Amino acid sequence: MPEQYHAEKRTIGGLLSMSEPPIEVSTVQRDFSWDTLHVRAFWEDLLSFSNTHPGSSLEGQEYFLGSIVLAKRGEGDVYVLVDGQQRLATATILLSVIRDFLGKYNLDAARQTQNEYIAKTDYLKGTSPHFDRMYKFQPYEHDRHFFRQLVQDDNIPDAAPKPTQRSHQLIAKARSFFKEQLGRQWETLGGGEKGFLWALRLQKVLTNHVSVVIAIALDEDIAFSVFETLNDRGIGVAPEDLIRNFVTLQAPETARPEVRSNMEKVWALEPELRLEDFFRHYWLSHKGDLKSRSLYRELKSSFSSEKLSPVDYSRDLAHSAEVYQRIVSCSDPDTDTSRHLESVKTLRAQALMPVLLSLFDLAEAGSVTAHQARTLVKTLVSLYVRHNVIGNLESSKLEEELFGLARDLREKKDSAGYALARLAKFAPADSDFKEAFSKAEVRRREVARYLLREIEVHRRRTGELDVAPSNKVNLEHIYPLSPGAEIQDSSLGEAVHRIGNLTILSTALNDKAKNSAFSKKQGFYAASDLLVAKELGDKAKFVAWTPETIAQRQAELANDAVAVWAMPTKP
């Protein structure tokens, strides 16, 4: 059997200097994506390794940077990089900055760094300014021209090229970060020979002592199989990146530009949403469950068993990503629907996302009206509050129900009516919810603010007064979380997180409460004065703040909660 790939250990310098042919990033890879956090980690690891082995103790030491997967293309005119783009791009950026600092003292050293690791120039061929230049590392095509101008060309103009996309900005930020770090040390050493020798040692650490294991495959398909096997075992690539590459490679060569374009629309939303969450929720929205822990394996199996079209799949992904982004950003033309989506966000109700994606996909298609969508979103929030937030019931059962509903919604003619009936049947009964609410404790401040704010809105439903959003009001513990020794009461301390011991106050009232004194003799915290005035209008109703008083108030709040988080049965 012919050898399909072979593996070997190389240093970063050995990998870059060997590249005749050069290393070119595969067309199924994404743009440069490392932000300052990743670049800083790369730098600090390198510096830590160097400092751990000062002077001649560096000899024989290695810092392992992981695996790199390459494929030969054609007759070997280029190596295609399937895995390792971010690390090699970042190493090249750092080498370019080292080159520039070396050139401050010794131009020959700078030229040697440039020719050996960055871009080899044959001055006997071609014409000025580039002559015949072979770039050792060639990033993703959308970044290539910008990367050459900013990083790889050693005759960089005074005016740096302007970034035209996010990946360009990240490349520029990475180079600025390295320039700042080297510049700081250069100034500390006073430049000159000391600065030069320090920069030279840093280059030696990076090129001669940072190692990788490279797997070189006969072709790109084999290389991707190696990459897939390594990373589906949890070694380092996110499942969404595996999915992107897999779907792109499933498409015929002529269709890959469209698939890549659709995938790029999904990745363009990355700063605003977590792609891993989106891919998982998209799958659950269509399939109802995950048979295994690996979403990537599920997708591969479906492509095989269902004969999915990679072009159609990428189109639907791009469309759903835009819909998902609107859900996450709580952006809907209907203001009430947007407010209910804010509730989903506040409660961190991730279990609702697959069914919300199905619902809004149907709304986009005209199968669900705006009124029906609004009612269903409110009902989903009510169910989540009843089942999870207050009921503390088994989350897995709620997820199983919701994920199945997300799938089934796409197949029903009367989607809204079917969904409301199914949700009402699954939800805890009013009596059970009321009892659970009357006993509940809430420790997450944003959830407590949300619950009390929604009840306050319900109580003011005639509309004479507005209530600020839950994130704009202050949560007050009537009996305080940290009472002084003179007011400690063990019976009240046990009830400190009960809903009945919590209230929301405006900033002005909250400041007044904080400036008031607690009188144990009086029997309740100053905030309860404000609470009674705000909420009950009858200070005599609570003559003392006791566990019984808290329970009484919480029972009254529970009566309102049943109406606030009601379960309607009609769309």
Image (spheres, rainbow, N blue to C red):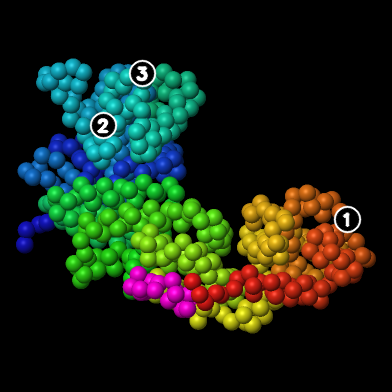
Rendered position, 381 above or below 243? below
Few, some or many C-alpha atoms within 10 Å of disc 2 (few <14, some 14-19, many ≥20)? Answer: some
Identity, as a three-letter code, of the amino acid under mark 2 = His
Identity, as a three-letter code, of the amino acid under mark 3 = Asp
Q: Answer whether residue 187 is magenta in the image.
A: no
Left or right relative to 478: residue 300: left
Q: Secondary structure at mark 1?
A: loop
Badge 2 is on which residue?
Answer: 145
The answer to whether the residue labelled 3 contacts the one labelled 2, judged by CB atoms less than 8 Å apart, is no
Please give the name of the residue rendered at 40% of the width and 62% of the height, measured from the top-left corner.
363
Q: Quadrant of residue 143?
A: top left
Please give the name of the residue rendered at 59% of the width and 73% of the height, measured from the top-left corner.
566
Q: Position of residue 336 (x, y in %)?
A: 55, 59
Rendered position, 238 above or below 98? below
Badge 3 is on which residue?
Answer: 158
Provide the residue span drawn in magenta.
408-423
**Real-space Cα distance between discs 2 and 1?**
68 Å
The answer to whether the residue labelled 3 contacts the one labelled 1, judged by CB atoms less than 8 Å apart, is no
Q: Nearer the viewer, residue 363 or 41?
A: 363
